[in-house]
Amino acid sequence: MDIFFEDDSAASWRLQAAGFDYSCLGAGKSLLASENFARLAGLVRERAARAVFDDSYSRVRHLLRFAWSPTERREAGGLRRARPGRFSTEAVTLRTCTACCR
């Protein structure tokens, strides 16, 4: 989530789902970052009534591939214990566009 301030065009905040301290959600805090992030976005919308929200990125993101071709790479996600005596490996596929998402 990117937050830009009208009175200071140089100031902005970028909140990322991973690694964010969701303690501001109090009793509404979940164990999953994805749920917490959605709740945080809802809280910001509720508290910043005069703010303009643009959540179109997820709907138009696929159009970026015409301007910047996406790159894809696989990374090892590490070893994970599936159950006692049983382990599995994970792989993560990361997609980024070559120009804007470095």
Image: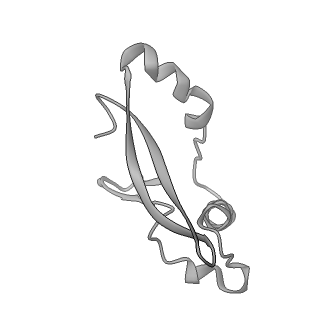
Q: Left or right: 36 with respect to 78?
A: right
**Coloring scheme used:** one colour
**In this view of the protein, which residue sits in the foreground, 89 or 99?**
89
- Which residue occupies 28% across, 28% down? 99
| Quadrant housing the C terminus | top left
| Residue 80 percent across, percent down from the top left | 52, 67
**In this view of the protein, which residue sits in the foreground, 85 or 5?**
85
| Residue 101 percent across, percent down from the top left | 34, 38
| Residue 24 percent across, percent down from the top left | 58, 81
Q: Residue furthest right?
A: 28
Q: Residue furthest top?
A: 66
Q: Left or right: 51 with respect to 101?
A: right
**In this view of the protein, which residue sits in the foreground, 45 or 9?**
45
Above or below, comparing residue 50 to residue 81 in the picture: above
- Which residue occupies 45% across, 22% down? 64
Q: Left or right: 23 with respect to 28?
A: left
- Which residue occupies 30% across, 28% down? 98
| Residue 40 percent across, percent down from the top left | 62, 66
Q: How many marks?
A: 0
**In this view of the protein, which residue sits in the foreground, 95 or 45?**
95
Q: Give the image quarter of residue 97.
A: top left
Above or below, comparing residue 69 to residue 52 in the picture: above
Q: Residue furthest front?
A: 85
